[in-house]
Amino acid sequence: MSLRIRELVKQGLVVSLFAQSALLSYCLPIEAQQQQQQQKGFQLPNMNRYRQTPQTRDANEYRSDRLTVPIELTDIPQYTGRAVFVTGLKYPRDRSGMRVGMTFGVQEGESEVLEWYKSALKTYKWSLLSEDVVDKSISAAKGKNSFTLRISPSKQPGFRTLMVQSYKFGI
């Protein structure tokens, strides 16, 4: 390859024949592609196969059901302080397993709630996967199930802390 061509390649000004034909097949309408193929005698790659839309999933798979009362999760320790159910969602049709998210308001401080759950989850034989004292969250697993607790200061009157529990049932 000559020095001049190498410089042009480095600058991105020379594009391979394959890249040119791929670009043309993407940009030109099908009729123009067919005319070009007949005139030049070579076959352009079929780029239409890359334009296919992905398979559609079940439209209801990620649809949530609103919870009006908390779901009792027998494998998760119930907070012994005064916890008031605020809101919740259930995703029963998720292919990877049902998910539940519930928010509770509590009177105790963030650190106290976090420490209580760390201790209680260990007692219930959960394996702590991660703990973030800055974001005030913990994640744990037991068998194929997973649990995440996120804690934040409450802006709602009557509560010092909000705790969001996320539970995922394994398949």
Image (cartoon, grey):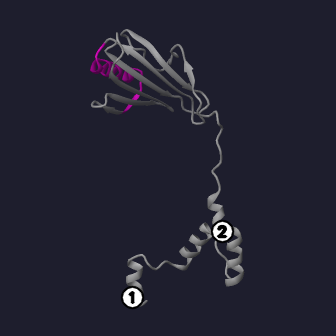
Tell me where the magenta segment starts and ends, as one range: 108-129
- Residue drawn at (64%, 72%), measured in percent from left and top? 45
Q: Which residue is mark 2?
A: 46
Q: Secondary structure at mark 2?
A: loop
- What quarter of the picture does the C terminus occupy? top right
Q: CA distance from mark 1 to mark 2?
A: 32 Å
- The numbered mark, 1 or 2, whose residue comes first in the sequence reads 1
Question: Picture coordinates of residue 157 (x, y %)?
Answer: 35, 11
Viewer-proximal residue among 23 and 125: 23
Label 2: how many Cα within 10 Å (few below 14, some 14–19, many 20+): few
Residue at figure coordinates x 37%, y 89% from the top left = 3
**Mark 2 belongs to which amino acid?**
Asn
- 114 is within the stretch colored magenta: yes
Q: Position of residue 92 (x, y in %)?
A: 60, 27
Q: Nearer the viewer, mark 1 or mark 2?
A: 1
**Residue 38 position by quadrant:** bottom right
* Number of other residues with Cα within 10 Å of mark 1, as a class: few under 14, some 14 to 19, many 20 or more: few
Image side of residue 78 versus residue 27, left or right: left
